Image (spheres, rainbow, N blue to C red):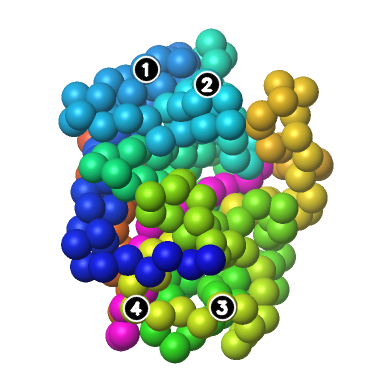
Amino acid sequence: MIFYKTEEEIELIRESCLLVCKALAHVASIIKPGITGEQIDREAEQVIRDHNAKPGFKGYRGFPGTLCISINEGVVHGIPTKREFQDGDVVSVDCGSFLNGFYGDSAYTFALGEVGDDVMDLLRITNTSLYKAIDTAIVGKRIGDIGFTVQDYCEKQHKYGVVRELVGHGIGKDLHEAPEVPNYGRRGRGPLMKEGLVIAIEPMVNLGKKEVRQSDDGWTIITKDKKPSAHFEHTIAVKKHKADILSDHVLIEEEIRKNAAVQEVAILV
Ligand code: MG
Ligand code: MG
């Protein structure tokens, strides 16, 4: 069942999403080769707790961290570890918070140091696909229009692998609500989007093939061919003419520009 949100509820979800992005912006300011996933996880948790909120993922189905940190072939759901980030790593950082009764959810993939052109292209295309998908999230369109947009751009035009097993989702009083929001699909299919629908759109796109598997740590989803993967996520509210993006990556990108160890991921037009 889909829970449509009131304007007041959407503002509360926005607050939760902005806190997530504040935590991710803090990550953007400190992430560099030589520091560990555990370190950025601890700092992100502190940002969230300093605002009288709770980490949205910690304890969710037993997940141990505030952040999901998925490096290189890691797609999503990576656990924070003592492994030091290395020059050339691409690091997906996914964060959730629970504030005033509502969840926020957003993710960004950071390119550390010298990342190959092919991988930077993957990041740019994946990030761009997120905004193309958001453009379709308006009243009267269907969930399949979102998936079609990501799949058409990433898979058909750019020959990347779009992950099938993991999807975006409704969000509100629960972290994962109906409907599921796949990154593949057919135009005009799936649930109709109406005013008050709040969803997390999160393309997960692989440089190589689309197939993924769970790694031996029991959490991290990795690409089967071990090629890198990218992941960007916004929480949005469906509106009549243009979706309202409740999370804010500008906060993150401002910090990236100040951090010499991280490369900016441009959005292509
Ligand atoms: Mg997320
Ligand atoms: Mg999500």
- Disc 3 to disc 2: CB gap under 8 Å: no
Instruction: Give the labeled residue for mark 3.
Output: 191
Q: Earlier in the sequence, mark 1 or mark 3?
A: 1
Residues drawn in magenta: 228-241
Q: Which residue: 54% across, 57% down? A: 168
Q: Pinpoint residue 40: horizontal percent, then vertical percent.
A: 39, 21
Q: Which residue: 47% across, 60% down? A: 170
Instruction: Give the labeled residue for mark 4.
Output: 195
Q: Which mark is residue 42?
A: 1
Q: CA distance from mark 3 to mark 2?
A: 33 Å
Please tell me whether residue 49 belongs to the stretch shown in magenta.
Answer: no
Instruction: Give the labeled residue for mark 2.
Output: 64
- Disc 1 to disc 2: CB gap under 8 Å: no
Q: Which residue: 66% across, 31% down? A: 220
**Crowding near the residue tagged with mark 1, few <14, some 14–19, many ≥20 C-alpha atoms within 10 Å:** some
Quadrant showing the C terminus: bottom left
Q: Amino acid at mark 1?
A: Arg
Write down the quadrant of residue 240 in the picture. bottom left
Dot 4 beta carbon under 8 Å from ligand 2: no
Q: Nearer the viewer, mark 1 or mark 3?
A: 3
Q: Amino acid at mark 3?
A: Pro
